[in-house]
Amino acid sequence: MMFQCISLIETTHENALEGKPTTKSALEYQEEKSESNDNTLQYHDIPSSESIPLDPINEKLPGVYTNGCCGIGHRLTRVVPTILYANNASKKAYIFWGDVSWSTLFHDTPYVQSIGSDEFRNTGKNDTVIYNHVPPNWPNFAKVNFPITNTTYDKYVERPWFHSRSLISVLVSMQESLSPLALSYFDPIHDQLRGAKKESGAVTMCVHVRQGNNEVGDWEEKVWRHVSVDELLDGTRASMEAFVRSRKAHKSLVFVASDNADVRPWFEANVPNNWNVLKPEKVLPRPENGVWFGDSRANEVRGSLNQTMQNEILAETIAEVFALGECDALWIPNFSTFTYPAIALTKAKENPVFFASVGDEGYQFHEMNSLDTFQT
């Protein structure tokens, strides 16, 4: 096997947000961009990639190859920056996922192509290979001295997701290239949300709840990720009610995504009478313990699943990832890499994103724009 394996230490200095050479800090670059360009999207039902096009690919250049594992959030926080990294160099990104192929979830595009194990093992000597990691020069903002907000936003340290117009282009391109299998889950959700938006005096609200489902390994060790689901749900509903009042809405549709199968029924039983909770047409069972794709036990948990079921599970998951970015507002009561794309897309549409803080008065929610500042 011959390849150029990138170094994550010895790299040229590039700016943190767009991947182009500069001597400016990420903060200085973002301030400059903010003054000279409109870095947000005007609201559309689905943003069009034609309004923020990706760079053309030079097919003669060597490719950028990457793989992935674990849950969909973990995979996307590595693959999406890698696609952006490749595109900024006018190169195509090639993606190998060994369990459920990229092509199961997305069509190939001029920018991204699904490959198999043989192609991944036999890359050329001038190709760039990134092993289940972010690309070089992707900023480690965990080391940046952000103001502490004491909200769930503090855990989202990869802030280029929320400040890079080009990264939004990647997400939009991915959403537009969803496979028929992924669309069989996404389209019914999207159609219900779109229909609700057309009604006068109605709002749509999205929420993601990561409960953990008695996982072990990484999840079990990170005590800060453990939550009281009942308290979390009560606080989220109260914040949603306040939002509905602020919009003077008389109808509401709530889309709920969660690893806990009891969360959607809780909303169905506890929201006001003039609200509806969106019911996806296709819903797959959750494992009794753990997750199908995720921590070190995931292979054991999904060991009884055949390939067809594994494909269906990740198709449902990727549909939820993008559907969460389709509402008039998004609630993030607890941290999960699953929601990076939804936060980015919701913010790009200039719709509010609410992050939770937990104190003596329970869960309180704070709009992203009031939290989203840089400090060096």
Image (cartoon, grey):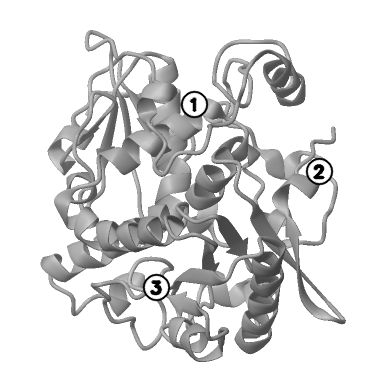
Mark 1 lies on a secondary structure that is: helix
**Percent x, y for residue 355?**
69, 61
Q: Nearer the viewer, residue 11 or 255?
A: 255
Is 239 located above or below residue 48 in the figure?
below
Eyeballing the image, is 195 above or below 363?
above
Going from N to C along the chain, the mark reached first, 3 or 1, is 1
**Mark 3 or 1, closer to the camera:** 3
- Quarter of the image with the C terminus is top right
Q: Amino acid at mark 2?
A: Phe
**Quadrant showing the N terminus:** top left
Q: Residue furthest bottom?
A: 269
In front: 283, or 5? 283
| Residue type pointed to by label 1 | Ser
Q: Residues within 10 Å of mark 2 (few under 14, many from 20)?
A: some
- Dot 2 or dot 1: first in sequence order is 2
- Relative placement, left or right, of 215 versus 30 is left
- For image coordinates 59% across by 28% down, the residue present is 9
Q: CA distance from mark 3 to mark 2?
A: 36 Å
Residue 166 marker: 1
Under tag 2, what secondary structure? Answer: loop
Do the residues under discs 2 and 1 have CB atoms within 8 angstroms? Answer: no
Q: In the rendering, which numbered label is found on residue 278?
A: 3
Q: Residue at x 48, y 46 (%)?
A: 77
Which residue is identified by label 2? 146
The residue at 57%/71% (across/down) is: 250
Query: Residue 19: horizontal and vertical position, in percent?
Result: 54, 20
> As shown in the figure, which amino acid type bears the numbered disc 3?
Leu
For discs 3 and 2, the disc positioned in front in the rendered view: 3
Please state which of residues 193 and 69 is positioned toward the viewer in this rendering: 193
